[in-house]
Amino acid sequence: MINFHNVQFIKSLINLEHRPQPELMEICFIGRSNVGKSSLLNALFGTRKLVKVSSTPGKTQLVNYFMVDNRFYCVDLPGYGFARLPKKEQVKWQKMIEGYLLGNDCLKKIYLLLDARHELQTIDRQMIEWLNHYGLDYSIILSKCDKISKNALNKTINDFKKNIPSVEILPFSIRNNEMIVGLKKEIARLGM
């Protein structure tokens, strides 16, 4: 049973040839810079300290591996779309993210985080189109749901379902234990 009680940071890497051993199934979390990936992982892991959280966009710059219950890896990918980085760094991150997503036989599921407070951004549309183009299995997590009203959240979910009908939409807030437990159950259903 996956319960997220035994979570360890394994390694950070930029060269995907140095993936951790043993090879286990992986799920990854991707999204724009500052969308809440690190906070979400800490909520899943039941800690505030395992994954570094920053209010400064672009803090996660490497592919970070966390082993969960000795069964699978949760992978925190760098945020995309951080414009203050030099163009050369942006290109390097993009290649690293694409290399991870496309060249990974262990990858079971991608969770794309989108901020529930905002309409679908152009860069997020591009990511969705890219994921669809390559036929990758992903779900959308609407982060920061606690920062908008229930009516606004329902409208956002309905808008997303109209625009992206074939993709599962999961609302999430680090302050809502029911949503945290729901995401844990969703991950457990993947059969890892």
Image: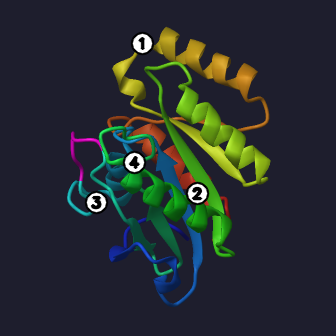
Residue at left 50%, top 72%?
Answer: 73
Q: Is 38 rendered above or below residue 9?
A: above
Q: Residue at x 47, y 14 (%)?
A: 150
Q: Which residue is mark 1?
A: 149
Question: Relative to 174, is 131 on the left or the right?
Answer: right
56 part of magenta stretch: yes
Nearer the N terminus, badge 1 or badge 2? 1
Q: Nearer the viewer, mark 4 or mark 2?
A: 4
The nearer-to-camera label among 3 and 4 is: 4
- As drawn, the label of residue 51 is 3
Quick one: quadrant of the C terminus? bottom right
What's the amino acid at mark 2? Ile
Identify the element where label 2 is drawn: helix
The residue labelled by disc 2 is 187
Q: What is the magenta range?
A: 53-57
Q: Tell me the element at label 1.
A: loop
In this rendering, the answer to whether 12 lies above or below 146 is below
Q: Which residue is mark 4?
A: 87
Badge 3 amino acid: Val
Q: CA distance from mark 3 to mark 2?
A: 19 Å
